[in-house]
Amino acid sequence: MAGTDHDKPLITGGPAIILVEPQLGENIGMVARAMANFGLSELRLINPRDGWPSDKARAAASKADHVIDGVVVFDTLEEAVADLNFIYATTARERDGFKPVRGPEQASRTLRTRTVAGERTGILFGRERFGLSNEEVAMADEIVTFPVNPAFASLNIAQAVLLMSYEWMKSGFGAEETPFSGPEVMPASKEHLNGMIGHLESALDARGYFRPAAKKPKMLDNLRAVLTRPAFTLEEIKLLRGIISSLDYFSPKTPRGSGHPERKAKEDRDRHSKSD
């Protein structure tokens, strides 16, 4: 539709839109256009199939150049969400797990509240062909799904982004009149959360927790889902990593406590004393 007024200030900001392995430049461009229509401006791409930059994406964006010019490309999902505090994963399929499932209107209100509180937020969108994997969904805090025809539930990626972008802008109408009720403490970034989960995975691996080995990916997905849900603060993550570190000093292969640095130092002193 026509109606663009270039004399009015451009609305930008909002949650980051993150596309996981998008295929067509045209789809990326239409995503950028949908974002610009409703005041979103931060677009992140993970391994776009046809590379970046893309002339096809710019053409399809229909002058949403501020979105296209600001695109950042990442190699992994972990890198793309490292600085974010809260993430929604979009999916049309039912998922086993521990995450709350929201509709787009409720999800957008939550994103608005958290953004106003100073959190960095994002929305994950999956591949054109098969969406997000269970492992990728597990990295999000909550799931957002659309009320679509169950017999024909497939949405084009640009359509999905358009729906969320529209709800985002709508959530800002009358926002000044709505009392703020956001979280009192800022959740840790995904970089810190994923660091803790990786630390715990290594500690559990050393103890043979993941048995049988074939079930480890699913066990990790469930573990990540459980640990993502509480929205730990940075101080809480530091506390938990301290506990995990203390467990690192114990192993079925060694006597209890024999791996602790202070215990090792004492044993080394004792050996030197005996040799003298």
Image: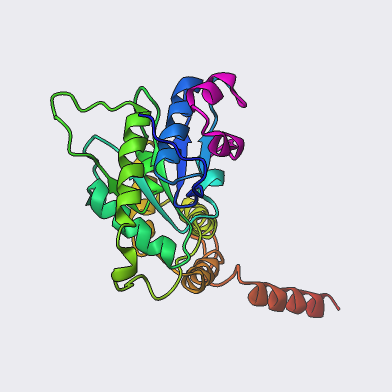
Query: Does residue 55 belong to the magenta stretch?
Result: yes
| Residue at point 43%, 61% (across, down) | 115
Query: Is residue 156 in view from this perspective?
Result: yes
Position of 228 relative to 132 (above/below): below
Query: In the picture, which quadrant includes the N terminus?
Result: top left
Considering depth in this image, is 154 or 173 the residue closer to the camera?
173
Residue 67, quarter of the rendered image: top right
Locate residue 68 relative to residue 139 in the image: left or right.
right
| Residue at point 32%, 72% (across, down) | 181
Q: Position of residue 146 (x, y in %)?
A: 22, 39
Q: Position of residue 19 (x, y in %)?
A: 46, 35
Query: Is residue 100 in view from this perspective?
Result: no
Position of 56 relative to 149 (above/below): above
Locate residue 236 relative to residue 182 in the image: left or right.
right
Q: Position of residue 98 (x, y in %)?
A: 26, 53
- The boundaries of the magenta stretch are 52-76
Query: In the picture, which quadrant includes the C terminus?
Result: bottom right
Query: Does residue 224 belong to the magenta stretch?
Result: no
